[in-house]
Amino acid sequence: MRRFLSRKLITYLIAFVIGVTVDWGIPRLIPGDPVQAYLSQFSLQPAGYDALYKTMSEAFGTNGSAWDQYMHYWQSILTWNMGVSIGNFPARVTTLVGQALPYTLALLIPAIVLSYILGNRLGAAAARRKGLDNSVLPLGYVFQAMPYPWLALIIPYLLAVVWHVFPLSGGYSNSLLPTWSWTFIGSLLTHWFLPFLTVFLVSLGGWAIGMRNLVIYELENDSSRYLRALGARERVIRRYAYRNASLPQLSGLALQLGVVVGGNIVTEIAFQYPGLGKLLYTAIGNKDYFLLQGIFIFIIIGVLIANFIIDLVFISIDPRTRLSMQGAPA
Amino acid sequence: MPTRKMTGRWRPAKLAAMTAAGLLTLATAAACSSSGTSSSGGSSPAATGASSAPAGGAITSFPRNETLYTSGTLYGAPSTWNPYNLGNYTTGAQGLIYEPLFLYDPSKGDLKPWLAESGTWDAANKVYTIKVRDNVKWSNGQPLTGADVAWSINSASTNAANPYNSNAAGAQAAASGNTVTVTFKSTPNYAAWDSYLWKAPVVSQAEFSKVPATQIATFADTKPVGTGPMTLLTYNATETAYQVKPDWWGSSAMGLNFKFKYLVDVVNGSNNVELGALTSGQVDWSNNFLPNINQLINGIGGYGFKTYYPNAPYMMPANTAWLEFNNTKAPFNNVNFRKAMAYAIDPQHIVNNVYGGLVQAANPTGLLPNLSKYIDQGVVSQYGFKYDPAKAKSFLAQSGYKGQQITLQVPNGWTDWMAAINTLAQDLKAVGINVQTVTPEYPQRTTNLTTGNYDMAIDNNANLDSTPWTYFQRVYNLPIQSQQTAQLNWERTNSPADWALVQRAGATPTSDTASLKATYGQLEKDFLQQLPMIPVWYNAAWFQGSTQHWTNYPSSGTANDAIPSLWRGYIGALTSIYALANLSPAPKAS
Amino acid sequence: MSLADTLQEPGAPIPGAPATPVATPRPRRNDFFYYGLRNKKLVFGLGLELLLVILAIVGPMISPHNTSDYFKLNAGPSGGNWLGTDFQGHDVFAQLVNGLRESYLVGALGAVSAAVVGMVLGFIAGWRGGILDEILQLLTNVIVMIPSLVLLVVVGAYLNTRSVLFEGVFIGLTTWPWVARAVRAQTFSLRSREFVDLAKLSGKRPTSIVIRDIAPNMASYLFLVVILLFGSSMLLAASYDFLGLGPSGVVSLGGMMQNANLNSALFFKEWWWFFPPGLVLTAMVASLLVANVGLDEVFNPKLRES
């Protein structure tokens, strides 16, 4: 077990180093000079330009030799200093991410977890009942096949523009200041609902179909046949099939939660929801490669942690994985 | 991974319930703590940090009848109120907090005294004397003095990192009480100095002398101390709130009284969102480009939106969009080729099909209408160009152009310009010019243009100004460097004679309008004969106001014709503050 | 979890496909057609898909207008403009059929490039194992870790124009890892089977063993994978286009939705502008998914409805 963990940790460490290195390269690899583009808004004479250019380069750590810059970057990362945004200069990346992250988490985690639970239930039920299958399966496919951008236009069109049931966009009403009041929480909730619904619906189809197919596979495989031959009750067989089918679904869930940190960019854009996806999009739009670089680090950390958790979950619930990890023949 | 047995127990439902309950709390907490709070007017800076209570009382929401909602300038979270950070300062930093010495009124073409009560040149036009207004106070309670004004001017003239460095070149200011004497070492550039007077902020010497000189344009100013009509109340990722200062000097001196108590500027959303917010009354004043807004104005469709002109083009021209090319390269180094393009382009295609009639075609000189007194109509009618494909083809035939492909670029994601180059390419192809449109990213495009590594591009970097000087400096500035970082002469036209004319215009006192008109007339003639770049259309200072909660929006041609724009370089420079003060509450809907 | 999401995290199982690639014996050709033609899902899915493909091929020819023609702005559907016009006065139907064509092209490019890269790397890693395998695992982890959107922005910054080819291949090159993982696992288990040992003994070269003996045993699975990749590439492309990161100067379904969103189509209730492109795309992908389940049942006799 310890050997397995240390081996895994080393792998993740290498991946992290590669990730940080790639990330370091982003603003440096991109053609065109972001600082120059930024300063072009100032209409400066050459002397002033040089002075400002120097100040900005220091702020972004793009002065000095490449090796110094690289070392400096590692030092910043390890001290939790993700740098400065150029589109919102001189705002710090950690500040901007800190403002956006809660919205993204509050939007995506419930949407993913609830769709996971309901989708799995629906899928398992569909695998059991022919009648249900005939409605769940086609509906599931339609939801799964819907492009996010489309759903993110249709839902607000119907529920916010045609029928004014929910607000069209934003994180909360402009007329409120964020405070601990029921009015504010109510405003948060009504603004949260439509983007939540979009993510929830699109995810639901995938989970349901995945579960349905996995359960059908499990019900038809040799172990189920064996159980049946032994005279086990169908309910028992189904329970086993459901459990076995949950494992791949579970790893899918963990991966989904891992990339939550990147936000759901399309939904957040369509609803102008002030989460990380919107921040990322703004960074792309402003050509804010330094902010992009900062968000990237958060995503890397999120994905690596999620992958690590999957590994841990798998060895704790699946003995065979544990065996194989310890070096025994699978 | 086939699994036969699973012993682990996984209860997702329970976990989910716990997570969901926790997350809402998280979101609320974060929204509360992530908002910045700033000191309120008149008092010493309040303690900030973890405290989530906004200064200035326990405000949790803005009363609708006391609040003006604006939008249109900010594309990201507000982060600084440093008026020298021309790329990023938050909407209102200049204008609502910091103020200039004068305001420029484009409709009348004159400078209105603002923080300066008056400004006069001596007889030799070498010394400029500013009388600073009495009884003006900084928001920290200290009085505005001549020393503050002198410090601001000297910072501009001596600190290369100050973005107004070239405007105040050679100036040396000394204060005596509220009188500031600005002495120029050599002949001043009168045009650039005029621009300084209404563009540059007056800052507090006590506050700004603490900032290292090299960081004057980049340091984060989040507790601004200004003389302006408002103070920064609070801000977060989606909005900035200002509170009207009851003891602002302009109330008594100018008779300007705001009927609202709060001004909340909302970070831009998509057009859907902006229009939705305007129609539902969540935003009153928008400076966004909203396509088709002309379908909703003056009561059409039941919406009482107001624009600056009641009819086409609806919006005030703000800058000139040129078709720009590298004049040092073939085929652009041939004047016949440049003329062929000028005659091949129909700006109406862009006006109607890209902007839906919200903009207007540019004057052939490219000078904005506010400078029309400097446009020599005789020159324009004699040398101007207009859409005429037949003439374009005949020029093209004399140009030696062999049909080689040329590229036309705009930054990726600038959707209106991307549509515009498509129609331009169609027009040019129609006369036989082989144009390929490309859309590099903005930084790449800027590098391409500053280094001259491009064929053709759309560009608009000569903004609205009180003098044609800036425009012609933009066109003819010499010398040409390998990197034209100063945003001047990106088309790389090399005409020493014209550059000498531009310098002569700069050295002519503003009062000598006769010589100025003669010099600019000559420049216009040269421009139209040589066409170093082709003016196509005027980008507009977008504005639409909703009359649900506030009325009396400014309108061109009426007494209330202040410029309704909160853009950087507009508010706190043009007459926008009058437009804000003139708003009155809408009569209650019956 | 949507299909497009799945591809953004290449480790996730493909919903709708066997999470465990089950190597099934190749069905005999006659069997295939016998069961195939009797499988309602397959017939329905393929039928609908075929109709849409025909529309994509002949649509631009039968459309009375070009995408660059100008008409009245923001007009609703009429006899002249079957699906109305957009904010610049362009015909929506013309855009729709051209966008349809572009979607299929991107989908095909994405599917083929992901399948090729994924299979080659998967076979190599599975067959050779050892250090090569470790490197592949690391590469997969890194690709999983790097958000493809950020990568697209960085790579896109080098291009003056983004072509359909670029978008398709980019999608393929960021979605191959899960194909590679699955193929690797399959190859791993197949290479110790008797028939492979026999092939080795007979002195066949490894490449030829992989191509002749191993790949055919996964053929049905690989085929399903390509179909799913095809659908998800189209969805992913629509998202990229919607965010303005798609091909420049090309009419696409996602681009139509982007324009509609940017230019207040919701507000002006110009449903004809954003409703049809999404509907068509949904139909394109859904019919692929349905056909895929049908195929799965045909290939895998255990799943057939009795």
Image (cartoon, coloured by chain):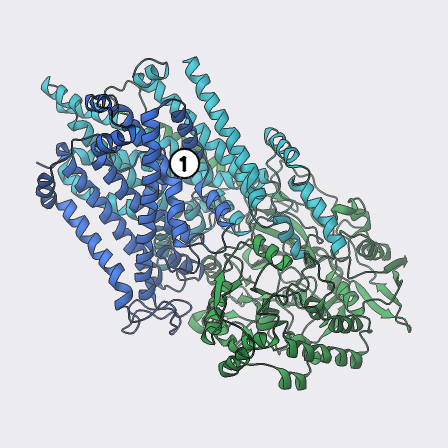
Q: What colour do you see for chain C? A: blue
Is B447 positioned to the left or the right of C77 in the image? right
Which residue is rendered at x = 27% and y = 73% of the image? C79
Reading the image, the residue beneath label 1 is: A109
Foreground pick, A311 / C35: C35
Viewer-closest of B61 and A250: A250
Q: Nearer the viewer, residue B119 or B367?
A: B367
Question: In this rendering, does residue B366 appear at all?
Answer: yes
Q: Amino acid at mark 1?
A: Ile
The image shows residue B508 at horizontal and vertical percentages of: 82, 74
Q: Is residue C191 above or below residue B422?
A: above
The image position of residue A146, as x and y in percent, is 31, 49
Q: Foreground: A151 or B257?
A: A151
Q: Is residue B184 left or right of residue C52?
A: right
Apparent colour of chain B: green
- Subunit of mark 1? A
Residue C220 in the figure: left or right of residue B140: left
At x 50% / y 67%, what residue is drawn?
A: B404
For numbered disc 1, what is the local secondary structure?
A: helix
- Up/down of B297 relative to C288, above or below: below
Q: Which chain is cyan?
A: A
